[in-house]
């Protein structure tokens, strides 16, 4: 019997095999399916459309050139692409800050370096939180959006979603647990 969670894993494995054989159509399918995720994460970290476009191109070029770097047994392809995009965007942000300081002839103080790193970490955590919210199941996402972005309590959330209060609390608790892995809460507070 095929389990629903096996279908994406099988698809990911098949795509990785097609890439390893050099099938350009596989890269096109993956790009169509996941480019908006990669671009969105890069843009969230960098705040620059051109830089986000470059990161997106780099991530898919890397996958094309190194299809064996992805192991479908360890994580979904979507998560792997998001992780690679996130790392590259954070690395680019750090690189841009260093180059900006060099161009201005500024030697940052330890306090400025710490503040810069804190800002980079906050942007990175926000991007991870965005990814987590977008990839969580729709019922959890709906409960979190009502509670945090529309300021509903669990009772109001239950009524608006047509679920029990216990189910609303469960969804909110699980959603918050998932978000805590990002390092920040949806409203920007540290987790």
Image (tube, grey):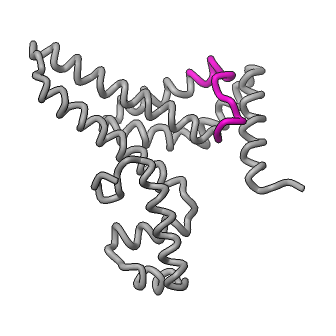
Screen quadrant of the N terminus: bottom right
Give yes or no for residue 70 being in the magenta stretch: yes
Q: Quadrant of residue 98?
A: top left
Question: Is 98 positioned to the left or the right of 106 in the image?
Answer: right
Please state the total of marks drawn on the protein image.
0
In the depicted structure, whether residue 132 falls above or below residue 147 = above
| Residue range of the region highlighted in magenta in the rendering | 62-76
- Percent x, y for residue 88? 43, 27
Which of 39/45 is in front? 45
Residue at point 78% right, 35% down? 14
In the depicted structure, whether residue 33 falls above or below residue 57 = below
In the depicted structure, whether residue 179 falls above or below residue 146 = above
In the depicted structure, whether residue 105 falls above or below residue 176 = above
- Percent x, y for residue 148? 35, 68
Extreme residue toward the right, this view: 1
Give yes or no for residue 108 being in the magenta stretch: no
- Percent x, y for residue 17? 77, 28
Residue at point 45% right, 49% down? 181
Residue at point 51% right, 64% down? 174
Residue at point 35% right, 58% down? 186
- Percent x, y for residue 51? 36, 29
Q: Quadrant of residue 153?
A: bottom left
């Amino acid at each position: 019997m095929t389990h629903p969670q096996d279908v994406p894993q099988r698809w990911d494995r098949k795509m990785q095999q097609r890439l390893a054989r050099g099938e350009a159509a596989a890269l096109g399918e993956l790009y169509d399916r996941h480019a908006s995720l990669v671009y969105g994460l890069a843009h969230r970290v960098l705040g620059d459309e051109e830089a986000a476009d470059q990161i997106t191109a780099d991530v898919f070029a890397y996958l094309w050139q190194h299809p064996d770097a992805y192991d479908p047994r360890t994580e979904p392809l979507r998560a792997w692409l998001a992780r690679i995009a996130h790392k590259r965007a954070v690395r680019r942000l750090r690189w841009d800050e260093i180059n900006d300081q060099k161009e201005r002839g500024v030697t940052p103080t330890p306090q400025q370096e710490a503040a810069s790193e804190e800002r980079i970490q906050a942007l990175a955590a926000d991007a991870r939180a965005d990814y987590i919210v977008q990839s969580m199941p729709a019922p959890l996402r709906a409960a979190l959006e009502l509670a945090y972005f529309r300021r509903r309590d669990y009772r109001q959330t239950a009524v608006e979603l047509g679920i029990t209060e216990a189910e609303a609390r469960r969804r909110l608790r699980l959603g918050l647990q998932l978000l805590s892995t990002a390092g920040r809460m949806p409203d920007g507070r540290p987790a």
